[in-house]
Amino acid sequence: MTSQTITAAGTWKLGDRRVNRIGFGAMRLAQNGEALVSGAVPRDRGQAVEVLRRAVDLGVNHIDTAAFYFSPLRSANELINRALAPYPEDLVITTKVGPGRGPSGEWLPHARPEQLRGQVEENLRQLGRDHLDVVNLRIVGSDSIAERFGALAELRQAGLVRHLGLSNVRPHHLDEALAIAPVVCVQNMYGIGVQPEQDAFLRTCGERGVAFVPFYSIAGTGRQAGAVGDDSAEVLEVARAHGASAAQVRLAWTLQRGPHVLAIPGTGDPEHLAANVAAGALRLTTAELAVLDSLHTLHRGSGAS
């Protein structure tokens, strides 16, 4: 595989930064096994650094991370810094703020508006940057985000943040945010059979020129623990037809939902990384898409999330 493979999926602009549509999610980088849990087993530092450098070699220029992606002894942000600084000029690092974890890994209450600057500055420190390319406000629930997003808009005006996005939000949050400042991306859980009620929101984002960035598009309901290995017969049949894996089919289907859809599959395994990048060149037929679309919509209203 060469670095040209990744360009088969095309590109999209996050504000003024153009990225390849296959990116890399750093959540699984800091540990082996389940992420975001106390007492996780730290990943070998050399392996993590190797995966990051290999991702860039393969053409990945969009990395998704967060200061709360850490395990004992390992921080995703600091691994990124160690592996890739000085950073390539075309590399876009997207991080997220809102959630926080204590030193032992326990979850803290989401940040209040006045606490978001501290979270932004911690990301800057760990990454060794003087500004952040994209910062997503991650939320839980349906309450107003105006105060929190407004606080980030002020940091954008101050030059600490270049572009703003949203994570785990509902359609009315995008309207609310756009009334305050430009939004370059929406990051929500989505995949085959996973939250099909997001279909309309995905289309709305495309109509507004906002990237839609699914997370857990491979893992699905396995979430931070990874894929649960219960792929349906339909997914497996399509995979066999292409000599591909079920994970690659899931990524290809996601990318074919629209040119504004970006993928951020995460892994700490070099072989899985190469397979994820290769999925960008996988083209599903109209008939295959119809089968997978039907499988997807079967879950509508089932509460799959």
Image (tube, rainbow, N blue to C red):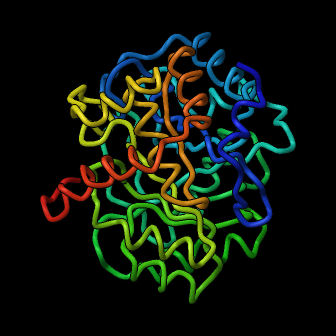
Q: Quadrant of the N terminus?
A: top right
Q: Quick check: 72 above or below 207? A: above
Tell whether 241 sits left or right of 276.
left
| Residue nearer the viewer, 105 or 254 | 254
User: Can you give x and y, in whole percent of width and height, for residue 69 in the image?
Assistant: 47, 37
User: Can you give x and y, in whole percent of width and height, for residue 264 in the image?
Assistant: 53, 42
Q: Residue drawn 57% across and 44% down? A: 64
Tell whether 142 sits left or right of 202.
left
Q: Residue drawn 34% across and 20% down? A: 33
Q: Residue drawn 29% across and 60% down? A: 196
Tell whether 96 sits left or right of 291.
right
Q: Quick check: 229 above or below 198? A: above
Count of numbered marks: 0
Identity of the residue furthest to the left in this view: 302
User: Can you give x and y, in whole percent of width and height, for residue 22 in the image?
Assistant: 61, 41
Q: Quadrant of residue 238?
A: top left
Identity of the residue furthest to the front in this view: 287
User: Can you give x and y, in whole percent of width and height, for residue 220 in the image?
Assistant: 30, 42
| Residue nearer the viewer, 217 or 167 | 217
Identity of the residue furthest to the bottom in this view: 179
| Residue nearer the viewer, 146 or 223 | 223
| Residue nearer the viewer, 112 or 43 | 43
